[in-house]
Structures are given as C-alpha cells and as structure tokens.
Image (cartoon, rainbow, N blue to C red):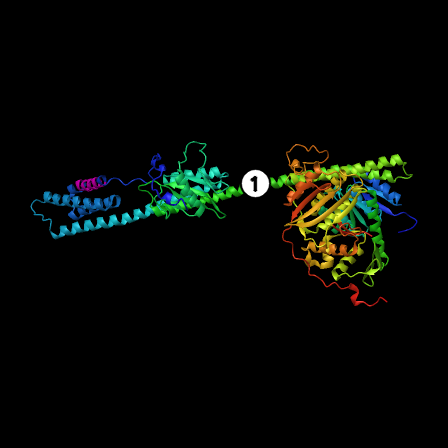
Amino acid sequence: MAYHAGMQQPESPATGLPRADAHPQLRPPSPASRRYLAALGASLGTAALALPLLPVLDVVNVAMLLLLAVVLVAIRLGRGPALLATLSGFSALVLALDWFTPGRAHDLSETRYAVTLGVMLAVGWIAARLTGRLREQADAALAREARTRALYELARALSVALQPEQVLDITRRFVERSFDARGTILLPDEAGRLALPGPDPGGNARPPVLSVLDMAVAQWAYDHAEPAGAGTATLPANQYIYLPLRAPMRIRGVLAVRLPAGPGMPLPERRALLDAFAALAAIALERVHYVDVAQDALVKMEGERLRNSLLAALSHDLRTPLTGLVGLSESLTLSQPALDAPQMELAQAVRDEARRMATLVANLLDMARIQSGGVKLNLQWQTIEEVVGSALRACRWQLGARSLDTAVPHGLPLVRFDAVLVERVLANLLENAAKYTPATARITVSAQVDGDTLAVRVRDDGPGLPPGREDTLFEKFVRGQAESPIAGVGLGLAICRAIVDAHGGRMRAWNDDGACFEFALPLGQPPALPEPEPSHPPAATTHEHR
Amino acid sequence: MNIDTPPVALLVEDEPQIRRFVRMALEGEGWQVHQSETLKRGLIDAGTRSPDLIILDLGLPDGDGLSLIREVRAWSPVPIIVLSARIDEGDKITALDAGADDYLTKPFGIGELLARVRATLRRQHKGIAEASAVVAFGAVEVDLHKRQVRRDGQPLHLTPTEYKLLTVLIANLGRVVTAPQLLREVWGPSNAENGHYVRIYMGHLRQKLEADPAQPRHLLTETAVGYRLQP
C-alpha cells in the first residue's frame, strides 16, 4: 500500500467535470411562503363564503365549516399553514360575530371562544401530524418501489447482455438514471490491472475521465475486494465511490460512481442500492465470461473432433494401399517357382521401399497430430528398457547387418511417458543412424540417470554430423523455419523433437567418434512399487523331483 | 479338423489388394479361403461357412468390426485375428477384450501374418488336447507340473508373482495378452490402476530369462497393448 499516503489528497482533477443536467428525482416541496399564502387564502375564502350565512346558521355550524378548511389545509400543506389558517379563520369569525350582532360585546377571552380556538388548533395540529406521517411513509414506499423497480429493470436489462461492453453500458445508464450520477465500470486485463473502458461507440454517454490517482484507488478496491472512496472507510475524501464487483468466482471489476452532492436519496439507501447494482453487474459479467468460456470449449472440441476424424481418415486411406503394396511385393518374393536373382532383388527393393514409405506416413501423421496441438499424451509409468526393446524389434529390418549394442542397466527408475510416441522417437533415431552409416557400423543404445532426467542416447561410429552444425541441428526443425539443407533429415528428427518437447524433455546431438543423439525425459515422482517378495523357488513346496 | 478337407478361413476385408495377398498367403499354407467384403456379408458367412479361422478388418465401410467379434463370440470360439489400420492402441485392446485372439497392424508382412495364424491355431488345439507339461523357449524350460523353471539346464528361482505372470503368458503362448488382462489374472481385479506392476515384473522376468533383456527374443512388448511370449 505504498501509494496509500499519496491518495490522501482530497482533491482530484476529476473534480471539474461538467455535470449532467440535474433531473430532480422527486418534485421539490413548494416554497414555504407559497404554502402559507395558500393556507391564508383557503381559510379567508372559506370565511368569506361561510360568514355571510351567520344570520341563517348557528355560529357553531359556521365554526365547523372553518374547521373543515383548517383540516384540509393541515392535510395538504402541513402544520404551520394549518396554524395560520386556524388563527385567520378564528379572527374572521370573531370579527363577523361583532358585525352581525353589534349589540353584544364579544370578548375574545370569553371561555367558549377559547374552547373553539383550542379545538380548532388541536384538530389542525393532529390532522397535520397524521397526514405528515402518512406522507412520509408513502414517500418512503414510493422510493423503495422506485429502487426495487430500478433493480428489477437493471437485472432484466443485464440478463440479455452477451458482451462485457453491453454490461458496462447498461450499468452506466442505470447508474445515471437512478442516482443522477456519472459512473463507469473498470475491467481488469489478464494481469489484473484495471483499465478504463474504451470510448463509447454511441458517443452519447461520455465516460468520466478518471485521473491516475483515481485509478490507483480503484485498483486498491479491486485488489482488496473492498469498497473505497466517498462514503467508505477508505479514502472517504475521494469524489468517487469504488465498489468491487464481487461475483461468486472472483472479482470481476470495479464500479466507480461519482455521486452528486445535495439532497436526494439518504446515504444508507443510496449505498444499498449501489451495492445491489454492483452485485448485479458482477454476476452479469461473470455469466458473460462463462458464456465465452463455454463457446471457446465448444469450438475447440468441435475442432478436435474434426481434426481427429480427418487424421483417422487420412491414416486409413494412406495405409490401406501401402498395406497392399507391402503384402503384394512380399507375395512376389515368396511366389513359387522362386524368382531369379535380379527379379528377387527388385521385389525385395519394392517391399523395403513400401515399408519405408509406411514409416514415413506414420511419422507424417504423428507430426500432424502433435503440431495441431490436439495430441493427448497417454502418460504411464514405463520402463525405458521395454521401449528400447520394442523399438529395436521394430527397426531390425532397417538396421540390416549393423551390430547393435545396448547399455540399459536393470533397475533404472520408472519414467512417465507415452510409450508409443517415445518408441517412435527411438525408432526414428535408429532409422536415422541406419541411414547415415555404412552397413558395417556399430550402433549403441544406452540409458542412464542424468541429474533429474533419464537420458537415452543413440550413438553410431559413422561419419558423424556435419561439423559445426551439431547445436543448430534441432533448431532447424522448429516449425516455420526453412527446410533443412541436410538431405533426408527432415521429418524424422522434427517429430522426435516435437514428441520430446511434449513430454517436457530436451533433445541434443553432438559428434563423439560418430553421431550421438540424446533425449532426456524428466524423472518425476514414481508411483509406489509392488511389495518386494522373498525370492524363493516356486517349487519349494513340492518334492517330486528325484 | 478333418484331414481330408482343407481348413476354411473367412477373410472379412473391403480392400481387394489386401484380400488378394492374404488369400495367396493362406492358400500357400493349405487353407481354403472364403472372402467377404462387408460386415453384413461376413456375419452371414461366419454362420454358414463354419470357418476354422476368421481374419477381420476393423475398419469396414458398413460398420465396426467390433460388433462382428462380439456376435461371433456369442456362439463360437473360432480364432479371430484382427487387422487394424488405426492409430489408437486403445482400439486393439478393445478388440482383444471383446474376444479377438490377436491383431496385426497395417502394414504387415506375410511372415507376421502366418506366424500369428499358426500361433493362434496351435493354442486352439492345445486347448482341446491336454496342455503339455513342459514348455520350452530359447534356453528356458518350464515344467508346469513340477512348477520348475530351468535355464540352460540349471534350475532358476522365480518369485511366486513372476512365476504366475510367466504361466499366464505360457497359457497364451505366441499370442498377445493385454496389460489389463495380465494385471487382472496375476494381481487381481483391485489392481487395475497399477499398470506399472506388469512392466516392472516383465523387467524382472526378462532379467532372469532373456540373454539381453534390452533386446528380448521371447518376452516381447506390444507397445501400449500388452505382451507376447514368442516361442
């Protein structure tokens, strides 16, 4: 929180924002003077209508009419005007009585007048109080209803949003409408840094300019998942209030609102409504996010399915004629009566080339599979000895008369890899060795623990790699690079590298009285081994042998 | 098998060139070969021709060869060898678990094909006759009655698990046994997760029985599928 101290500055450049035209949320109460005038008018008007009837009606009836006026004034205009109406009405009544019955002296302090005045005052007072409370309740109910409606409408508007931009826009509009306030949502980038939203394409709602300082507060609110700014415990002097958008999975952004000063909704209600807005926006953003995630997954799945079926079809279509070719040429070599020597040689050459072709196709398909990113490694805890054995068996016909040594000590740790693919690596390295060495060469396959890896080497005593190229040899095969100038060293080593990379291993080559290729696979944490057994002869219980 | 009439093989394969050389190879061995191009036809022929051997392509145009294996297995133990051009080793395990006896991955040589056929039939006949008490491969001799293993004539000590593993392989001599099946038969059904047990014990067996454990001649690995004891 190094920037905390700096944030204490109360003013920010954002202060000078042009404010939107104020839309008064509720009708302001009419000015007091007008209310008193109206009260006076009402009571005098009633007096003017009722007093001429004094000769006809009893004075009590006339007082009742005046009382009615007072009650109405109390209901409509409140306590003070009711008092004024009472006094003016009462004075008018007394003056009228003087006028109509001049013979009698009317003493205002006379008891019956005092009662009338008292009753009128009391009735006006009570009526004003009751209606005042009612009005307050009605106002509160209205405000509550307005808030609920705003929330409901926001929820409904957000429910159809499909883009984060839509969520931003909708929330901004509702904040403006409900609070008469400028607001915006700040979304984090991948690194969790908040960024200002881009300019509104509609151009009708200009996003507020947040200074660097404001961004720092917003970032604080985001990082700590706590509200900050105006009206909160953190930096209350800030003009804006920053509410983190807390969704079930994570914080989705920050809602920054600059609430206008002056009358309006009481603060607690305003905060509650803002919090509710923030929660709705957060959930909408999260939903939009997962819509995206689901769509991506769907597209990826569909792509993978398509790729797999394409590769399976390719594999079938390429391998079928090759199978025929291998089988038919071999039938030729076995046909009766036997072929003569040159014909036999030709038939065998056809068979061998067809087999080579088949290996090439297998490499090609594996390469396509791995480079398309759709390959799923079938990782199992394996012994390298086993894979060396099966690779040698698969390559025996290619190695011909070359002598083959293995140095794979028993008891090497288990390594987790895809046996089919690693067998392909070994087979390619062996095939490579066979291709570039004379028929009398010696090839050695060895394996040993090297640091935290298991290193497997294929060494030959042939002419070796082109000098000076050992290190760059594998770099050549990075996808997108130019074709290797070394004839024939293309796909085989490229696929080796791709497979080893997919296992998190590394691959290198150097000259050591011939070419030496090495791939190293990470050792990892092998699983529990089966219980060791006492090595006793299984026949220990039988004594049949003589 | 009647000595007078040649054995009948049913070849279910849609590719004519593959049919051609497989037929030639089998006829050279004295088989009478019947060919079906589709799964539907193959199912009918399997019922009416009562073949002694079925060679089945898994990727037929009118359906999955697996369904034929399952159907035939419902009423016949006839040996089935599967031809598969698929990349996925899982398909082979599925086919073997469904009751196929062995498989060949395309492209395959004629030598391989005939070796598979012979191994499958040998095993079939063994099941009918009494299993022989002594099995030999390379320099190794296993006496199943006396539970004795000899190498170069010298008694060899195997642990009970190693011996059990060896006997399962001997019972399927020349034929592939899937790794899950070995796990089930040697370690029991509760060890399905411990695939590495099989690999470790196969390593032990090779150490004791093979001249060069890294270049085995008899205890062969069918990568990602299983193991085969090659006599």
Q: Position of residue A209 (x, y in %)?
A: 39, 36
Query: In screen coordinates, is A215 left or right of A460?
Result: left
Give percent across and percent down for residue A412: 69, 53
Quadrant including the C terminus of chain A: bottom right
Q: Give the image location of residue A178, x and y in percent.
A: 38, 40
Residue labelled with disc 1: A295
Which is nearer the eye, A265 or A213?
Answer: A213
Residue B143 seen in the figure: no
Q: In this rendering, does residue A357 appear at all?
A: yes
CA neighbours of label 1 inside 10 A, class few (<14), some (14 to 19), many (20+): few
Q: Main secondary structure of the magenta part?
A: helix
Residue at image location 82% in from the left, 63% down from the top: B146
SS type, badge 1: helix
Q: Is residue A78 left or right of residue A432?
A: left
For the image, the number of numbered tags is 1
Quarter of the image for residue A52 reads top left
Q: Amino acid at mark 1?
A: Gln
Provide residue A429's location: percent of width, then percent of height: 72, 42
Residue in front for this viewpoint, A158 or A244: A244
Q: Is residue A47 left or right of residue A502?
A: left
Please identify the quarter of the rendering in which residue A203 is found.
Answer: top left
Query: What range is drawn magenta here?
Result: A35-48
Nearest the eye: A237 or A531: A531
Between B6 and A136, the one nearer to me in the picture: B6
Q: Is residue A496 magenta?
A: no
Pick out the residue farthest to the right. Answer: B4
Question: What's the chain of the residue with tag 1?
Answer: A
